[in-house]
Image (cartoon, grey):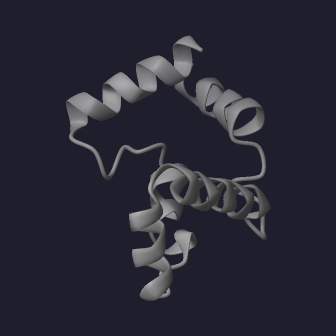
Amino acid sequence: DAFWCLVQICELYVPGYYSQGLEAVQLDGQVLYRLVRKVSTVAYKHLQKHQVDPLLYMTEWFMCLFCRTLPWATALRVWDMFFSE
C-alpha cells in the first residue's frame, strides 16, 4: 500500500519532480519566486541582492514534501492536507 501511495504521489501530484532535468521543480521554483515577489517585496529584494536562487532552498522542501524541514507534527499536518485535497 505504501509503495502504491508513493507511485500516486509521484505520478499525480508531483509529476516531473523526479525526472532527469527536474523541470517541474524548476518551474515551481519560479512560481514560488514570483509569489515571494508579489507577497513580500522586502524578502524578494533581499534574496535578489544576495543572488539567492529559489532552487537553492526550495528544492529540498518540494522534493521531500516538507518532511525534512518542518517539525514532524507539522509535516504530518501538511501531508494530511495534501492527501485530503
Compared to residue 71, the image places residue 44 above or below, namely below
Residue 37 x, y percent position in the rendering: 55, 60
Residue 53, by quadrant, is bottom right
Residue 10, relative to residue 24: is it above or below?
A: above
Q: Which quadrant holds residue 24?
A: bottom right
Q: Split into 4 quadrants, where in the image is the C terminus?
A: top right
Q: How many marks?
A: 0
Report x, y in % for residue 65. 48, 43
Q: In this view, does 66 lie above or below 41?
A: above
- x%, y% of residue 68? 33, 51
Q: Nearer the viewer, residue 54 or 48?
A: 48
Q: In this view, does 43 lie to the left or right of 3?
A: left
Answer with left or right where residue 77 lies relative to residue 24.
left
Residue at position x 56%, y 71% from top?
Answer: 55
Q: Is residue 42 left or right of residue 7?
A: left
Of residues 34 and 27, the one drawn nearer to the viewer in this rendering: 34
In the image, taking residue 48 as reference, residue 33 lies left or right, namely: right
Going by the picture, which residue comes out furthest to the front?
41
Image: 60 above or below 55: above
Residue farthest to the top, as pictured: 84
Residue at 76%, 36% in the rendered image: 11
Task: State the image coordinates of residue 80 (x, y, percent, origin top left).
Answer: 43, 18
Q: Residue placed at 69% from the left, 33% from the top?
A: 13
Which corner quadrant holds the N terminus?
top right
Could you tell me which residue is drawn at 65 percent across and 32 percent down? 9
